[in-house]
Image (tube, rainbow, N blue to C red):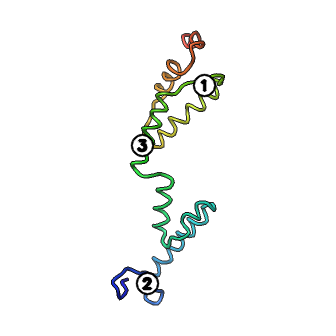
Amino acid sequence: MKNVKGEDVPKTRANCNAEDLKKWEKNAKTKKWFVCGLGPDKYRRIQGYSTAKQIYDTLQVTHEGTTEVNRSRGTLLLSHCENFAMRDGETIQNMYTRFTTLPNELKSLGRIISEEERVEKILTRVLPATWESNITTI
């Protein structure tokens, strides 16, 4: 509702009709579910908000990021994937575990790298030259 200055302000309980009270109750329940599911760090981020919508929007941006951030993150991950190399003294298992996190993160951003591309990348460009006989066998 508008106050005397023409600003939007929340209705008081006395000014609410039955429909407003139902909306108020739904908002309170939703806020409760959000708050109960959050840890202390995330709670501090949303504690000042009065509506479930404000909480939802804040949590969505926090966890998913904005479109521009996701696009930049995807580009960066693709670059890491293209420039991926096995480290000196690293085991195959550790290298593969480190490598699989990149396509998995890209998948969460909607960019999918096929299994064939992953295998080709590892066999042809990631493994060191000492693995050449094993690669030929495979």
Indicate whether 5 appears above or below 119: below
Towards the viewer: 93 or 85: 85
Mark 1 closeness class: few <14, some 14–19, many ≥20 residues within 10 Å? few
The three-letter code of the residue at mark 2 reads: Lys
Q: Which residue is mark 2?
A: 11
In the picture of the structure, the residue carrying the numbered disc 1 is 87
Q: Is residue 121 above or below residue 10?
A: above
Q: In the figure, residue 137 lies in which quadrant?
A: top right
Q: Amino acid at mark 1?
A: Arg
The residue where tag 3 is placed is 72
Please, what is the three-letter code of the amino acid marked with disc 3?
Ser
Circle 1 — which element?
A: loop
Name the residue located 60 percent from the left edge and 25 percent from the top edge. 87
- Mark 3 / mark 2, whichever is N-terminal: 2
Q: CA distance from mark 1 to mark 3?
A: 26 Å
Q: Earlier in the sequence, mark 2 or mark 1?
A: 2
Distance from disc 3 to disc 2, alpha carbons, whole Å, reads 42 Å
Residue contact between numbered discs 1 and 3, judged by CB atoms under 8 Å: no
The percent coordinates of residue 53 (x first, y second) are: 45, 67
The residue shown at (64%, 27%) is 93
Above or below for 31 versus 121: below
Q: Residue drawn at (56%, 69%), measured in percent from left and top?
A: 47
